[in-house]
Image: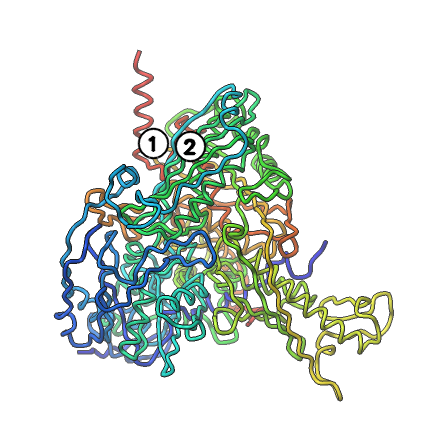
Amino acid sequence: MTHAVIGHSVKRTDLLDKVTGNAKYVADMPMAGLLHAKMKRCNVAHARIRRIDTSAALALPGVKAILTHENVPRVLHAGSPHPRSASVTCDQYILDDKVRYWGEGVAAVAATSEEIAARAVELIEVEYEPLPALFTVEDAAAPGAPLIHDREPGGNLVLPPVRIERGDADQGFADADFILEGVYEGGRPTPAYMEPNVLTCKWDGNGNLTVWISTQTAFMVRGIMAEVLGLPLHKVRVLVDHMGGGFGAKQDLFQSEFLCALLARETHRPVRMEYTREETFLGGRTRHPARIWLRQGFRNDGTITAREAKVVFNSGAYGSHGPGVTNVGTAAMVSLYRCENVRLEGRCVYTNSPIAGAFRGYGVVQTYYALDIQMDEAAERLGMDPAELKLRNAVREGDIAPSNHPLIGRGLEACIARGMEAVDWKARRAATRQQHGAIRRGWGVGCEMHGSSAYPGIKEQGNAIVKMNEDGTVVLLTGAAGLGTGAHTALAQIVAEELAIPFESVSVVHGDTDVVPWDIGAFASHTTYMVGRAAQMAAGEIKTQLLARAARQMEAEPDALDIADGVISVRDRQGPTMTVREAVMPRKGLPAAQFVGTATYHPTKSYSFAAHFVEVEVDTETGFITVRQVVPVHDIGKVIHPVAAAGQIEGGIQQGIGHTLYEDYQIDMGTGRSLNANFVDYKMPLAMDMPEIHTILLEAAPDPGGPFGAKGVGEDPIVAIGPAIANAVFDAIGVRFRHYPIKPEQVLQALAARRAAEARP
Amino acid sequence: MRKLIEVEINGEPRELAVEPHSTLLDALRYDAGLTGTKKGCDVGECGSCTILVDGKPMNSCLMLAPEAHGRKIVTIEGIQPHADAVHPIQEQFMRCGAAQCGFCTPGFVVAAKALLDANPNPTRDEIRFAIAGNICRCTGYTRIVEAIEQTAEDLRRHPQCHCAPETVR
């Protein structure tokens, strides 16, 4: 089927303002009487606050208000407030009399300038009574370990262990010809969005609170702020226009939201709090560090007979997304490569370290790193080509997905097969066998699948309102946030396609919780799939209303009418046509039509697939690994905006290369002090580190649940790239790394250890 | 005690009363009202605050405002030729998908302008080197490099061209 608007890379509606500098982010908005707020952060990993003295700070000219745990409401709340969701952990206070990680906020100051606020923060004296600090999951989960939170289920667990069983794993292992077992570990990458966390709060004389904030989840911010501050929802208005990235982490609340609101209330002035870059590390969210023990049974023909895994995620000091990540990351291991006998266990443990939260790939980055690498190990053991082995075991139509829904289509097989052909895989792999010298090249493949939306873990829904103006132009009202993906453009394309009107005739209103329909937020590869489908349905409502009115004017039956490019005609009838504008506009004796379409979409479940083919170069003298090229092959169903979709994939690959080779946010294991909270010591891939990427988009397995068959794309690319790199490194130098990031010194150590082993008689 | 500086910003002579310890970035954002230049780190690590000072790309967070006295400054707001047109760099950034969240984009556009002013025929490696001080976390850089390469081609063909945007909100 051909489409007039979707499938074309129309000019994104947000970009003109972004390339000209006109786009207003929260910190760009001037406000009369604005005060600046700063947080005082603790310099101890676990302690009770014995005394906090703000008198010197309050005496500083320009300081208008100071909050500590002694003068803020004490309301237990969830830092990641998903409604009606399993992934809610009520373990936070705005400010507590205890601190649980180095960098936790203990006080906040509002002053007439940022400099004065920062000086006041220095003048606040805090006396701590140190408590034993636990930095590793092993220490925190040990019997008798001190408790970081006094809550169920105890033992420093964030949630009861997640257990998933299918088939009979014991029998499966008994039926195996051989068993592989390994431990895989993931470090602590951070999202490192370019716009530091920022918000401005202002109260009006009637007690209405307005919040301008950089968040992915305006309605969740509204909900939890109303709950904690004791306000009805209509008294809290959350506004989000442009925001500088989030990658999952900007779903949480970071203490600053409540503090800013309370400071604004106390001072009767608008208050802005803008994090420094260092604070985005200290008080931000990271990916969950993870340790995965994985054991699988194989037959000599490559069939997997059993799979058993124990996954432990490090939640850091608070629960945040620990429950969601543990459920999603653990459950993912039932799938990707077919296996009927599965036994999985996932745990998530509190430690006195930085808070792990939501981050693109949500637990699956960690578990598929293990699963995909072990498939590569199996191929090595079997003497088989790893791409062939993965293709043979790839999940397919009807297999039961992690969500317990049957899969639609054969997307993963299509991705692997297409990629093998595109890179001339067999010839490339054969060529890496014949290498000499210090520089070695290798090719690897990594696979993944990822659900569109968080359903059924969260009972999500997509909502949309579409209105048609009296000139035939259309307004879409959506709660979906635009964190930089081009989501609003994709939604406008879907509406234009459904109504068969030009893309330019659709505008999008978003980012105002008082105006737009409720949305859970822009995360979990949800927006195009779920909100897109709701927008399509709401546009369909308009279309029905429009055709009914046009039919009366054209003296035909509504179902005999067609619309194409904004023109309505009667099917199989020569003669006059009518534009959409003419059909809706006022005429003598006929007022303009009021067309409003509303829709709520309750999803099924949809999965996107990818296989990444990667070439690396390993310098065996320096240990340095360079990614030379990446060929990502993705099946995301119907592609709405090819350039934006490819942009998601390439950006995900950049973050995934960072995870796998460079990025690790570290703390001192004696004190919990942050060690690399800046962009020099926390090394991300820059323009000169990034390879050429040749993206291939397939439409092999469109999902009937998504708009025009579209599925999610945001998270997929960050999952497949990691194991692809690790597998390519093995192909290059024959050393198997089962952790990330893989650092040059580790490459050198591994090569030295191998030489030493070979030298032994 | 504020200090009066005279500076040419985007072709216009301006007098700004700045704190002597203020960065040029803060002076541009808060005293001159030009918020297109972004603060991503404030310590010279991310390049989001890149501006041209006498034609050279600089991190405006690493300059004190008084140092700008008597200099010519171009910010992102000065790249757009006039309200109804965009610079070819801006056009190609939109077309190629070189901007996503957009927060780093002003810095990249300015860095690209500095490169193409100095070197109208850059290789891909030269483009990557020219933007090595600018961090983007969204795009993977591929499309940024492509946009700059395409712009160089546009400028070679139509050195005076200011493409009108096809789509305006």
- The vertical placement of B33 against A163, above or below, is below
User: In this rendering, would A326 be left or right of A254?
Assistant: right
Coloring applied to the structure:
rainbow
The answer to whether residue B115 of the structure is visible from this angle is: yes
| Res A543 quadrant in image | bottom right
Q: Nearer the viewer, residue A235 or A194?
A: A235
| Tag 1 residue | A747
Give amino acid for label 1.
Val
User: In this rendering, would A406 be left or right of A455?
Assistant: right
State how far apart marks 2 and 1 are (Cα): 10 Å
Q: Residues within 10 Å of mark 2 (few under 14, many from 20)?
A: many
Q: Nearer the viewer, residue A180 or A334?
A: A334
Q: Nearer the viewer, residue B62 or A92?
A: A92
Q: Nearer the viewer, residue A79 or A73?
A: A73
Give amino acid for label 2.
Val
| Tag 2 residue | A729
Q: Position of residue A592 (x, y in %)?
A: 69, 82
| Res B6 quadrant in image | bottom left
Q: Position of residue A619 (x, y in %)?
A: 36, 33
SS at badge 2: helix
The answer to whether residue B52 of the structure is visible from this angle is: no
Judging from the image, mark 1 belongs to the subunit labelled A
- The vertical placement of A710 against A206, above or below, is above
Tags 2 and 1 both on a single chain: yes
For image coordinates 57% across by 31% down, the residue present is A393
User: In this rendering, would A257 be left or right of A557?
Assistant: left
Q: Are marks 2 and 1 in contact (CB under 8 Å)?
A: yes
